Each structure stands twice: as structure tokens, then as C-alpha cells.
Amino acid sequence: MICQTCGNQVTAEVRFCPQCGAPVVVAAAPVPPPPIPPAYPPPYPPVYATRAPRVQRNLQMLGILWCAFGGYRIITGLIGIFIMRVITFRSFGDWGWGGPFHGAPWMVALLPLIAVVSVVTAFLAFLVGFSLLRRKPWGRVLGIVVAILALLKFPIGTALGIYTLWVLAPAESGMEYEAIADRT
């Protein structure tokens, strides 16, 4: 070691310099520099970059809505049959289906037509809902066809038809649906 005051060579055990008497400062071992902190993690990617494609995001909801629409079609069909029956037969069920008839003959023929249309549209709606929920390969095409037919059933069918066409009709949606379709 070297005395800081006079520059004389001193041993490490002494506390004062034998030449000048100045206190000897023991130099501490060099302190290593602090470790460099790791780089900050990269910022999170924007939300739009991590979102699932449009078809994958909306397919589950679309299937559920089509099943609900099928139930809605059955309920509205039953209400329509009930109203036509009351208008036609002027009773709530006392005479059965073939009882006294007070309305126009075309009204009697309308009852089975309402029943058939309600059953067919409800069946198609349930079939579209099932095919979309199960990711059937034919579900997209059936969904587009039934959505076009549902556009006529204002307001709920129109809204569901527009939503279905927005999700399933574009060409990119066809490629997305093919990628996630269940081929079993």
C-alpha cells in the first residue's frame, strides 16, 4: 500500500504512516458495477393484433342466436294458429278442429299453412344453429341461405339475417370457416 499523504510504501497492517504519521486509508476492494437490469419486457401487442378472426369470434353466438330464433318461430307459429282459430271458429277450443265455422273458407286453409311454415322455419333455424355450434362443413352455406330467407321476418329475422351474412358471407370468412370446420 502507499500512503496517501507522502507516497511512502507501508504495509497493510499499519494504521499510520511511519514516515509522516498520517492515517493510512485502507483502500477497499473495487466494487463491481451493479448488474445491468434486464431489458424491459416488450409492450403488449395492440388488442386488434391478438383478437381471433371474425368468424371464430362470432360463430358461437351466431349458433346460439339461431337456436333461439328457432324457438321464437315455434312460439310465434303457435300464437298465430291460436289467433286464427279464435277468429275462424269464434271459440277457444270448445268445438275442436272441425266444429262450427264462422269465417271465410280460406281462413280454415290458413291454419295448416301457418303450422307447416312455422315447423319448417323452426327446423331450419335449429339446423343452422346446430351446424354452426358443431362447426359442420355445410353449416356456412346453409346459414347463408337461411339468413337470406330470414331477412323477410322483420325485425328479429332481419337483424339475425344481417348479422349472419356479415359474419359468414365474405370470401375471407369462407376460408376461415373451412379452417375451423369439423371434418369428422
Image (cartoon, rainbow, N blue to C red):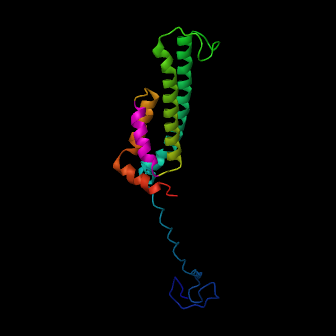
Magenta stretch: includes residue 141: yes
Q: Residue at x 43, y 28 (%)?
A: 153
Residue 33 percent location from the top left of the image: 51, 74
Residue 21 percent location from the top left of the image: 59, 84
Task: For the N terminus, give its image quadrant.
Answer: bottom right
Report the magenta residues as a range.
137-151
Q: Nearer the viewer, residue 32 or 1?
A: 32
Magenta portion: prevailing SS class? helix
Q: Residue at x 45, y 61 (%)?
A: 42
Q: Residue at x 55, y 10 (%)?
A: 101
Left or right of residue 39, residue 10 in this image: right
**In this view, which residue lies farthest toward the left?**
171
Q: Nearer the viewer, residue 159 or 89?
A: 89
Number of labels in the image equals 0
Q: Residue at x 39, y 41 (%)?
A: 166
Can the viewer see residue 153 in this picture?
yes
Can the viewer see residue 162 in this picture?
no
Magenta stretch: includes residue 25: no
